[in-house]
Amino acid sequence: MNEKYLVKLQQDMLLKNFTLSTREDYYHFVKRFLDFVNKDAMSITYADIRKFIFHLKDDENKKASTINVYTAAIRFFFEYTLGYLWDSKKVPKMKRDRQLPVILTREQVNLLIESMDNYKHKAITATMYSSGLRVSEVCHLRYEDIRRKQKMIHVPLSKNRQDRYTILSDKNLEILTEYWYRFNRPMGWLFPSTVRDEPLTNSAVELFIKKHAHKLGLPKGVTPHTMRHCFACHALEDGISHTYIQQLLGHRSPGSTDVYLQMTSKALMGIQSPFDTFEGDGRNDR
């Protein structure tokens, strides 16, 4: 019924120069919405959109952050593909709960990496932690992105559509070199898929990290992104400048990096409670 609109949606996203992952997500979300309302796109109303959002919230228990992405996709479809004006008061953006992510200790990170039998998995996990990369960024690294002499990793067109460089540690370079020789010296994608000439997928990395973390009995909620969080927190504890960490992570706004200040060890950062500055042992003299 709405195939022609979905084709136009894909064209509109190409004109907007969305990344492939964004185009795939928006297409999937809009198609789900159209299948749900089961009517011609030009006759869709705000009531239809609200009904779908309540379905995601109440029947599927989707998080507010996920629902907001659905809403963004539908809004783009509404404005660009159908040519309608969007009223954000009728479909407001949901307030999100700001939960702090899981942070592992340095010992736990080391255990996670060193206990991996699959050397490819070890190299991927070590690279995410040592350089603060997103899972999509490590999956799309190419051989030439590893700048060995400069001790840097080139991250092309990351989430914010900007090139950046991050650090390459000596220890991680040793792991990457060993991996490269063990796995047939890949010259294209650094971590290629085993079934086709494409990079390893985000979901594949998420699967093996979650599975291995569970096997080790690490805290619940460990994901590939945990490695990036740990990099930022441990760097702050080591006294690395907040500004430098923002640049290494590729955050546009300092606010995106501020969250790590909440999760770092205050003792390692040299922060002392005023209660510990009192003289005496804290007990009443007798």
Image (tube, rainbow, N blue to C red):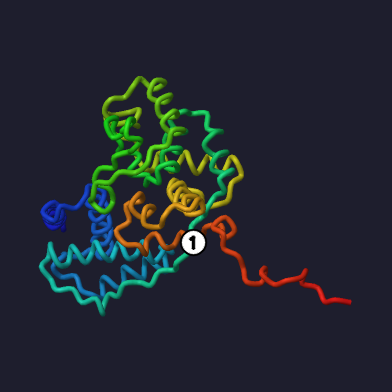
Name the foreground residue: 94 vs 83: 94
The residue nearer to you, when weighing 84 against 39, is 84
Q: Is there any visible trace of residue 192 in the rendered image?
A: no
Q: Is residue 20 visible?
A: yes
Q: Residue at x 32, y 34 (%)?
A: 150
Name the side, left or right, on which 105 lies relative to 140: right
Residue 168 percent across, percent down from the top left: 38, 37
Q: At 57% across and 55% down in the image, what residue appears?
A: 268
Q: Amino acid at mark 1?
A: Leu
Quadrant into which the C terminus falls: bottom right
- Report which quarter residue 27 is drawn in: bottom left
Q: Is residue 54 above or below residue 259?
A: below
- Is residue 219 depicted above or below 282 in this figure? above
Using the image, determine if residue 29 lies above or below residue 190.
Answer: below
* Residue hosting label 1: 100
| Left/right of residue 159 with respect to residue 168 in the rendered view | left
Q: Label 1: few (<14), some or many (≥20) within 10 Å? A: few
Q: Quadrant of residue 241?
A: bottom left
Q: Is residue 53 left or right of residue 263?
A: left
Q: Horizontal placement of 220 versus 275: left or right?
A: left
Check the image and name the residue furthest to the front.
279
Query: Where's residue 20, x and y in %?
Result: 22, 47
Q: Quadrant of the N terminus?
A: bottom left
> Observer-nearest residue: 38 or 149?
149
Question: Toward the viewer: 122 or 7?
Answer: 122
Residue 92: horizontal and vertical position, in percent?
Answer: 30, 75
